[in-house]
Amino acid sequence: MKFIDEYRNQELGKKLVDRIHHQSTKPIKLMEFCGGHTVAIFKHGLRQLLPQTIKMLSGPGCPVCVTANSDLDKAIALAHLPNVIITTFGDMLRVPGSYSSLQLAKAEGSDVRVVYSAQDAVFIARDNPDKSVIFIGIGFETTAPTIAASIQQAEQEGIDNYYVLSLHKLCPPIMKALLDLGEVRLDGIICPGHVSAIIGSHPYKFIPDDYGIACVVSGFEPLDILLSVDRLVNQIETEQPKVEIAYRRGVKPEGNQPALKLMDNVFEICEANWRGIGPVPLSGLRLNQKYQRFDAENSFDIDPGPSREPEGCICGSILRGVSTPLDCKLFGKACTPVCPVGPCMVSSEASCATYYHYGADYGG
Amino acid sequence: MCLAIPALVKSIEGQQAVVEIGGVTRQASIQLTPEVKVGDYVLLHTGYAINVIDPVEAEETLKLLRELSEVY
Amino acid sequence: MEDRILLAHGSGGKLGHDLIEKNFVPALGNPILNKLDDSAVFELCGRLAFTTDSYTVSPIFFPGGDIGKLAVCGTVNDLAMNGATPLYLSLSFIIEEGLPVTELEKIVNSIYQAADEAGVKIVTGDTKVVNQGTADKLFINTSGVGIVPAGVDISGANAMPGDKVILSGSLGDHGIAVLSKRQGFEFNVPIESDCAPLNRLVADILATSDNLHCLRDPTRGGLATTLNEFARQSQVGIRIDEASLPINEAVLAACELLGFDPLYVANEGKLVAVVAPPDADKVLASMKQNRYGTKASIIGEVVSEHPGKVVMKTYLGSSRIVDMLVGELLPRIC
């Protein structure tokens, strides 16, 4: 597969690993912000190839994991309404809310359908004019423009039974909030590659400028990630933190302007509630005035009830990079992928599920 | 987050394209990449092309990888 | 106006009898079935293998097969995986009211073709029809009996350190072929389901080696789940090599698109054999002679380390655990 296979080359990978070993002289902490990077790192066993000097931490870049129970409860409450079809990405189906999950709601008779694309949800709305089709909008800046596009498509085609529950969140504000918490001293950040395809690299400038932390925007193939680690080590060893794009084939410094414009047309920035972190100002997206009629939250009367967090679950501190899944008393015992307590064990790209699935012993 | 994979644009009709990867073809929306042309590669995320891949930069990255791996 | 299956077809009355006599018996008939008695009566001598499976695949027609072919091959293969020669199958339909008769006929024809290829006979059956909306077009159950030759002892608990792990062909074809036609995912793949009866392939292996320890077809849950089952049942470790796994490019591409790992995608015409090391090469050679084993390869070995766990050596030479499938395989955005 073009633009994939070349970046999985074994020979180059081994040599790059050697180079990192030679370059890295002092102990450093790197965080891969994005859940997709966490999965790639574990899937290819990259952590065990890196030198002992480099400690990798997983960040909160998993849109499923950072969705607060109060928000998930809203989605489940919508699922219980009559004449409603809930459409959702597969990632959300099994995540436990305060009392239930979309999967359980489905088993109890709600019409919950997994879709690959927000566009499929629009088609379902078009084909079911007597039902309300609600799309559960999760994801960061990679996905938000696609949902904005789906809303514009519904508008253009006169589809008036399509709604979105916008739970979208933004990366740079949460990165800042995390750094401001000061719980973990980071030396470098592997920045999310596909979020950056949309927003470009300029929004990360505050990280080296204000915090002195090295930043590299990374792709997702093994060679991409190893290259990014190499670049980060180089920045750190030469004490020249900056924002560098290693994923040059996918990311331009200015991002994707038409996508940003579309997001701007449909959404406005608001406060968002992040699991494990709490409310963070200007870190979420909601539908703006012009598109209010597509907003599921305002169009339906629901009462999700008071939200509650599972006892003993430390997803929050894992998301902030303060703890690892191995620090959790429930990990692998009361909390497993078969009976997950928190979202970090459900989402395919979250720390706990990844550690469990790929073997913490093997260090990823 | 954000599974997106490189796919080749085979044909375009209005705001929809047919894209192909490894012999698999699918409909995709190009609402986010209106400038795309047949023959371009795009990053496909949940049925939408979210960016056009720059083949020159792709080759430059491979070149850099080869150069870096020669140093040690 | 298209002929459709009605509730009356399943009520035991004339319509039902007509369906059996005009559609089922002509296609599937044999001396035992043709009697149309309440049970099939036949003689069998030896150690019997007996299995049952229900088939609920959606959509019922997919590239490379349909639910009928699956219902025969799946049960034939379950018998074959214990070394049995499959002989007789039962066939039960639960049909959703409204199914076009032409679709049922196509499926019955597929059942005939698959049974004929496998050399098994359908000897007894049942038909029920349920209200619209209470079955997804068609569910099928097949049970099967076969005879296990003397001296054959194949079990997931028999793997021993040093054994070689052999896979009969490419991974994930069936799962991807079916998913490509499911509503909400439509994509076009130049891939067909690998659904096939494997009893003759198994017979070839048994004719070549007395040291076949484990055998299983990696259906739901994929290769990863099957290998984990062996590791747990035998309390051994299994190591596989990512570079040696045969996977079609289109399957890899579809998995990339959806966020699947091919190790977990279902196969319906593949088997995993665990063989004592001296016999591995000749078993491999014999598998390659069979039409369903041309792409067979040795993908790993059994070890005494990490009992109960499966570990894979990645392209880059690192190692990672390959766990069992948990829950359903769902497409992801992340």
Image (cartoon, coloured by chain):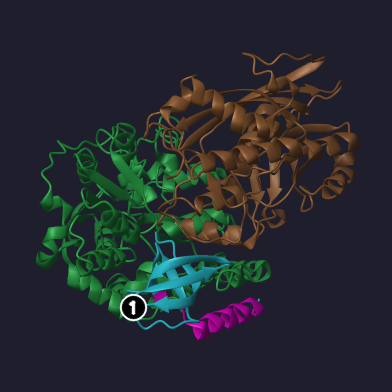
- Binning the other alpha carbons within 10 Å of mark 1 as few (below 14), some (14 to 19) or many (20 upward) gives many
A16 up-or-down from C302: above or below: below
Seen from the viewer's position, the closer of residues C129 and A228 is: C129
Q: Quadrant of the N terminus of chain B?
A: bottom left
Q: Amino acid at mark 1?
A: Gly
Q: Residue at x 51, y 39 (%)?
A: C101
Secondary structure, mark 1, is loop
Q: Chain of mark 1?
A: A
Residue C324 in the image, given as x and y percentages of width and height = 56, 39
Magenta stretch, main secondary structure class: helix
C301 up-or-down from A19: above or below: above
Q: Residue C27 lies in magenta, yes or no?
A: no
Seen from the viewer's position, the closer of residues A129 and C310 is: A129
Chain drawn brown in the picture: C
Q: Quadrant of residue C109?
A: top right
Q: Quadrant of residue A264?
A: bottom left
Magenta stretch, residue numbers: B51-71
* Count of labels in the image: 1
Q: Quadrant of residue A187?
A: bottom left
Residue A125 in the image, given as x and y percentages of width and height = 26, 55
Whether residue A335 sits left or right of residue C59 in the image: it is left
- Please indicate, yes or no, whether residue A238 appears anywhere in the rendered image: no
A262 up-or-down from C277: above or below: below
Residue occupied by mark 1: A255
Chain drawn green in the picture: A
Q: Quadrant of the C terminus of chain B?
A: bottom right
Residue C115 in the image, given as x and y percentages of width and height = 71, 35
Residue C144 in the image, given as x and y percentages of width and height = 68, 24
Colour applied to chain B: cyan
- Please indicate, yes or no, whether residue A250 appears anywhere in the rendered image: yes
